[in-house]
Image (cartoon, rainbow, N blue to C red):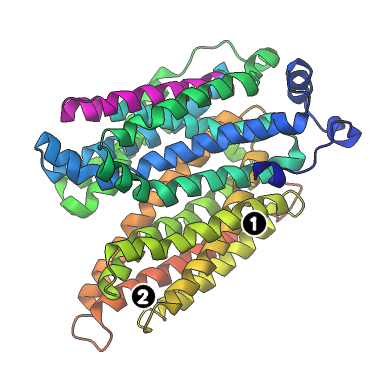
C-alpha cells in the first residue's frame, strides 16, 4: 500500500537531482539501495513508525490503569503518575533533544530515542513495584521526546523538497493510527494477556526500528561537520527549560483536580513563569543557546507556530469533551462511543496523505487557512446541533472535522519545518512539538473550564445545562480556529519578509 502512495521519483530525473542537497547526493552514492524511491520510502517509514509508537503509548496504557492499580494495591491518584510522568518528560525535554539533534546528528539522537523507548518499555513490563513502573515510564518518556523532537526534522533534512508534503502526510497518518487503535489494543492486550504486555509489545518493534534507522537514515552531522560549532552545551538553559515546562504542564493538567486558584497550582504557575523567564534571559546572553532565537526572527515561521497552537486547542478539546457528550448527553455505552469516534480516525487517515501530497503543489498556508475556516464552521454548526435527536449530527461533525484537520496538520507540518532557518531543523522541531503539546494541554483545560462554568450558569434556564456547557465550549473552539486561520493567512502576507 505504501508503495502505491509513493510519488514518482525517477532515478534518472535531472530535475530532482538538481534540487537535492549534498546530503541527498552523498547518501544516495553510499547507499546500498539501487532504487532511490525505495530508500526515501524507508526514511518515511522509520519516521512514521516513531510518530505511531509515541502516540500509541500515550493512549494504550490508559485503559490498563485500573488493572495496574489493583495489581500494586495503590490509589487512582498514585496510578495517574504512570500517565503524568510520561507526559511531563516527553513534553519538557523536546527543546533539549531538538538541540541535541542539531549538534550531534539527527540519526544518532533518533536512534537513541528508539533505544531508550525500547529499554523503558522493557523495564515497564518487568516492573515489580509502582515506583519502578513510574521510573521506567520516565525513561520511556525521554525516548518518546527524542522520537518526536527529531522525527519532523528528518523529513526536510534528508528528503527532496518535492516529496516532503507527502512524507509529512504519512507521518501524520502514523500518529493518527496510534491514537485510533491505542485504547482498543490496550483493552484487548490487558484482557487476554496481561497489562505487562501493553509495554512489552513495543520491544520487538523497537529493535526492528533501530535497525532501520541505522541502515537507512544518513548521518547529517558527519556529512556537514563544518557547520557544527565547538562551543559548550547550554546545561543551565536545559535545566531551566525542563523545570519551567514541567511545572507549567503539571499545573495545566492538575488544575482541574486541585482547583485553579489553589496554592499548589498557583505556585506551579508562578514558579513556571520565573524559571521560563530566567531561561529566555539566559538564551539571550548565551553564546550557544538551547533555544535558537533565530527561529523567531522568521515572521513566517512564528506565524505558522502560532497557527498550530490555536488549531490544536480545538483538536484536544474535542477529543476530551466528545466522549462525555456521547455517554452523558446521548446515553451511549462506552463500547459504542469508541466505535463512533473511530469514524474520525478513519476519515483523517484517508485525508492526511492526500492533503500532504497536495501541499507539495499548492501553497501550504492556503490549505491550512481553508482547513481552519472549515473547522470553525464545523464547530459552530455542531455547537447548535447538540440537542438534535439521533447520531446524524455527530456523524456529520466527525467526518467534517476529520477532513478539516486532515487538510491542516500535514500541510502545516510541512510549512513549519520548511520555513525554519537552515541548519536549525532539530531546534525547530523541538519548538514546534513543544507548542503542539502546550496547545493540546491548553485545549483540554480551557474546554473543560468553559463547559463546567456554562453548565453551572445554565442551571434553571430553558437550555439543558449539559448541552449549554458543550455548546459554549464548541463556540470557543470555532473562535480559536478563526485565530488559527488568521495566522495561516499571515504566512502568505508579504512574501519578501523572512
* C-alpha separation, residue under disc 2 versus residue under disc 1: 29 Å
Relative placement, left or right, of 154 versus 99 is right
In the depicted structure, whether residue 410 falls above or below residue 447? above
Q: Position of residue 89 (x, y in %)?
A: 34, 32
Q: Residue furthest bottom?
A: 462
Nearer to us in this view, 93 or 184: 184
Task: Count the labels in the image.
Answer: 2
Q: Residue at x 70, y 28 (%)?
A: 39
Residue span colored magenta? 108-135
Q: Position of residue 273 (x, y in %)?
A: 33, 40
Q: Quadrant of residue 154?
A: top right
Could you tell which of marks 2 and 1 lies nearer the N-terminus? 2
Magenta segment, prevailing SS (helix, strand or loop) = helix
Q: Residue at x 27, y 43 (%)?
A: 192
Nearer to us in this view, 45 or 302: 45
In the depicted structure, whether residue 469 falls above or below residue 290? below
Q: Quadrant of residue 238?
A: top left
Judged from the image, the secondary structure of the residue bearing numbered disc 1 is helix
Q: Quadrant of residue 367?
A: bottom right
Crowd around label 1: few <14 · some 14–19 · many ≥20 (10 Å): some
Residue 487 seen in this snapshot: no
Relative placement, left or right, of 467 versus 474 is left
The mark found on residue 490 in the picture is 1
Nearer to us in this view, 83 or 414: 83
Crowd around label 2: few <14 · some 14–19 · many ≥20 (10 Å): many
Judged from the image, the secondary structure of the residue bearing numbered disc 2 is helix
- Asked if the stretch drawn in magenta spans residue 113, the answer is yes
Q: Position of residue 211 (x, y in %)?
A: 55, 20
Q: Which residue is mark 2?
A: 471
The mark found on residue 131 in the picture is none
Amino acid at each position: 500500500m505504501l508503495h502505491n502512495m509513493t510519488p514518482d521519483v525517477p532515478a534518472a530525473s535531472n530535475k530532482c537531482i538538481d534540487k537535492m542537497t549534498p546530503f541527498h547526493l552523498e547518501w544516495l552514492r553510499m547507499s546500498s539501495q539501487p532504487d532511490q524511491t525505495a530508500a526515501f520510502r524507508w526514511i518515511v517509514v522509520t519516521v512514521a513508525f516513531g510518530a505511531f509508537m509515541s502516540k500509541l503509548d500515550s493512549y494504550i496504557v490508559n485503559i490498563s490503569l485500573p488493572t495496574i492499580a489493583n495489581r500494586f494495591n495503590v490509589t487512582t491518584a498514585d496510578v495517574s503518575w504512570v500517565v503524568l510522568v510520561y507526559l511531563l518528560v516527553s513534553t519538557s525535554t523536546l527543546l533539549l533533544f531538538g538541540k541535541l539533534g542539531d549538534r550531534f546528528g539527527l540519526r544518532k539522537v533518533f536512534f537513541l530515542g528508539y533505544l531508550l523507548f525500547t529499554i523503558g518499555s522493557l523495564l515497564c513490563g518487568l516492573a515489580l513495584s509502582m515506583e519502578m513502573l513510574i521510573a521506567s515510564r520516565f525513561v520511556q518518556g525521554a525516548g518518546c521526546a527524542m522520537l518526536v523532537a527529531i522525527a519532523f526534522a528528518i523529513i526536510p533534512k534528508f528528503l527532496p523538497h518535492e516529496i516532503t508534503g507527502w512524507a509529512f502526510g504519512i507521518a501524520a497518518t502514523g500518529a493518527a493510527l496510534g491514537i485510533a487503535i491505542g485504547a482498543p489494543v490496550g483493552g484487548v492486550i490487558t484482557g487476554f494477556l496481561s497489562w505487562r504486555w501493553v509495554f512489552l509489545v513495543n520491544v520487538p518493534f523497537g529493535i526492528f526500528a533501530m535497525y532501520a534507522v541505522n541502515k537507512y537514515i544518513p548521518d547529517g552531522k558527519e556529512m556537514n561537520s563544518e557547520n557544527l560549532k565547538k562551543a559548550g552545551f547550554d546545561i543551565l538553559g536545559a535545566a531551566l527549560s525542563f523545570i519551567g515546562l514541567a511545572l507549567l504542564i503539571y499545573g495545566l493538567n492538575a488544575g482541574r483536580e486541585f482547583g485553579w486558584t489553589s496554592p499548589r497550582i498557583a505556585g506551579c504557575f508562578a514558579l513556571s513563569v520565573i524559571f521560563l523567564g530566567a531561561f529566555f534571559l539566559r538564551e539571550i546572553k548565551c553564546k550557544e543557546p538551547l533555544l535558537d532565537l533565530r527561529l523567531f526572527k522568521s515572521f513566517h515561521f512564528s506565524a505558522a507556530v502560532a497557527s498550530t497552537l490555536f488549531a490544536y486547542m480545538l483538536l484536544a478539546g474535542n477529543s476530551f469533551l466528545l466522549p462525555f457528550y456521547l455517554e452523558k448527553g446521548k446515553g451511549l455505552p462506552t463500547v459504542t462511543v469508541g466505535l463512533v469516534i473511530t469514524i474520525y480516525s478513519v476519515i483523517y487517515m484517508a485525508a492526511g496523505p492526500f492533503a500532504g501530497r497536495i501541499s507539495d503543489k499548492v501553497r501550504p498556508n492556503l490549505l491550512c487557512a481553508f482547513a481552519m475556516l472549515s473547522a470553525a464552521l464545523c464547530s459552530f454548526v455542531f455547537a447548535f446541533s447538540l440537542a438534535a435527536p439521533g447520531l446524524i449530527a455527530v456523524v456529520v461533525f466527525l467526518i467534517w472535522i476529520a477532513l478539516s484537520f486532515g487538510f491542516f496538520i500535514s500541510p502545516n507540518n510541512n510549512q513549519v519545518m520548511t520555513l525554519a532557518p537552515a541548519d536549525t531543523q532539530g531546534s525547530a522541531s523541538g519548538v514546534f512539538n513543544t507548542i503542539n503539546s502546550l496547545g493540546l494541554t491548553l485545549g483540554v483545560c480551557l474546554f473543560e473550564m468553559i463547559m463546567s462554568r456554562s453548565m453551572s450558569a445554565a442551571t434553571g434556564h430553558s437550555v439543558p445545562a449539559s448541552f449549554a456547557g458543550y455548546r459554549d465550549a464548541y463556540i470557543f473552539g470555532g473562535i480559536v480556529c478563526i485565530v488559527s486561520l488568521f495566522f495561516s493567512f499571515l504566512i502568505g502576507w508579504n512574501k519578501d519578509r523572512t
